[in-house]
Amino acid sequence: MPKLAALVTRPSEADRRYFSGRAREFEFTNVRSVRRMPPEDARAVLLHRPIWAVSTLSVPARIPLVPALFDYVIFDEASQSDIASALPLLARASKAVVVGDPMQLNFVRPLGTAAEHALMDAASLPKAGRSTFAQSINSLFDFCERLPVANRMFLADQFRSAPAIVDYLNADFYKDRLIDRKSEEHFKPPNGYRPGLAWEDVGGNATRRDGGTVNTAEAERIAALLKRFAADASFSGTVGVISPFNAQVAEIQKIAHSRLSDSERERLSLRIATVDKFQGGEADVIIFSLVLTPTAPLSTRTFLQKERRRLNVAVSRAKALCIIVGDLSYAKSCRVRHIEFLAERASRPWSPPKPNLFDSSWERRLYTAMQARGLQPFPQYPVGRRYLDFALDPDGIKLDVEVDGRRWHTDASGNRKTADVLRDREMTARGWKVLRFWVHQLAHDMETCLDSIERELGTR
């Protein structure tokens, strides 16, 4: 990449003379805005500066409105973007890549539905189909995700968090589609903790103040944890403190600043913020102040019940460790399903799932049939952080044989799941040949499947 960048970004002497001449022309004709830059000049600049990183609001002042000026526009955090702000960028590109997570927070809606209907009426827009592009109910991600022409890809690889955190996120939000790409050994939490989730049991009373709901006992415990982490010589990571409520964030900031010195806060790179403000950020350790207790106002409970995705955002900011601070007994019985689930997961030790020898009766049948052919299959063979259904000749040809049922290995459109495709690419990169059989293939003609295995091994 550095070699390519140097080749592209360094103009030739002829290019330099061209740009110098055009700059003098702009100066003489008093062209001071990119809005007046001719398309040919914009394209000439892009030959040497082909990648631009901008905010949606800064585009008009930096990039001329030239149709299809760029090959691609990439929107990151698209669930945080509104449709209207994206239109000027879409106009400047031939294709768009829209990246977002519908299980995280959406942008703040700029309009209510009544106001938007009035504006649409004033613009004489047809009433049919308005909901597909309405700003009041759709983010940019929502709008693009429903387009029939869109090619969809799930980004399964999770490189940020410890396996136990990814396991929780999979279980409650992502239907076991995430693949954790870092082992526990990559993470160094504070002394006394294992990478993953932990629960700090604090009772206290959640009360309503002018600024919102506050639990001072949780804030006190968090300050004590921060003091301990700052004094831990074995810990050199960053710390973030998150709460769903502004008033609780203010309480934590007040107490933490009174208990920790400037140098201690600096050592931890301490950041204290609401879930909304922390989205997009990360820290080695996240401390999450839940605030919920039996004395909490009904509005607090209602907010947490409706805002399930805030738990996903809060926990997924953590790289090594997420500590939830709250009333454990009440959290386990509060009748808010996602909070009860988090309390159960964070309060018990985690261990990676251990594979059974066979995941299905068809794996057992294929195993028996391969042995009858004189083959030596190794079931549930570990490679990296994965287990192969069967490994054959793992020290030589390296053949990975997988048995797939359509129920578990196809998506809603009937196509093979993206996770399988990505997994096969990983195995190929590790030097393995991958041979997959659908269950119906084994049921229809087991012998032909065995012949395929022998051909791959070179024994037929």
Image (tube, rainbow, N blue to C red):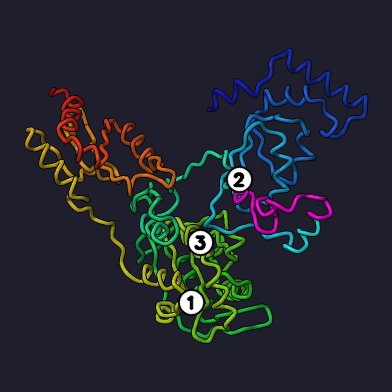
| Residue 247 on image: x %, y % | 63, 75
Q: Look at discs 3 and 2 and give the one toward the viewer.
A: 2
Question: How many discs mark residues in the rendered view?
Answer: 3
Residue range in magenta is: 120-143
Which label's residue is closer to the chain start, 3 or 2?
A: 2
Q: Classify 10 Å Cα crowding around label 3: few (below 14), some (14-19), many (20 and above).
A: many
Residue at point 69%, 41% (across, down): 54
Q: Which residue is mark 1?
A: 221
Residue at point 47%, 62% (across, down): 315
Residue at the far top: name it. Answer: 14
Residue type at numbered disc 3: Val
The answer to whether residue 299 is above or below residue 161 is below
Which label's residue is closer to the chain start, 1 or 2?
A: 2
Q: Which residue is mark 2?
A: 144
Residue at the far right: name it. Answer: 29
Q: CA distance from mark 3 to mark 1?
A: 15 Å
Is 244 on the left-hand or right-hand side of 181? Answer: right
Q: In the image shown, does 115 or 179 lie closer to the viewer?
A: 115
Q: Which residue is mark 3?
A: 239
**Residues at circles 3 and 2 in contact by the CB criterion of under 8 Å:** no
Residue 234 visible in this rendered orientation of the protein = no
Is 434 on the left-hand or right-hand side of 95? Answer: left
> Which image quadrant for residue 31?
top right
Residue type at numbered disc 2: Cys
| Residue 98 on image: x %, y % | 59, 43
Q: In the image shown, does 316 or 423 lie closer to the viewer?
A: 423
Q: Secondary structure at mark 1?
A: helix
> Which image quadrant for residue 211?
bottom right
Q: Secondary structure at mark 3?
A: strand
| Residue 157 on image: x %, y % | 42, 45
Residue type at numbered disc 1: Arg
Q: CA distance from mark 1 to mark 2?
A: 44 Å
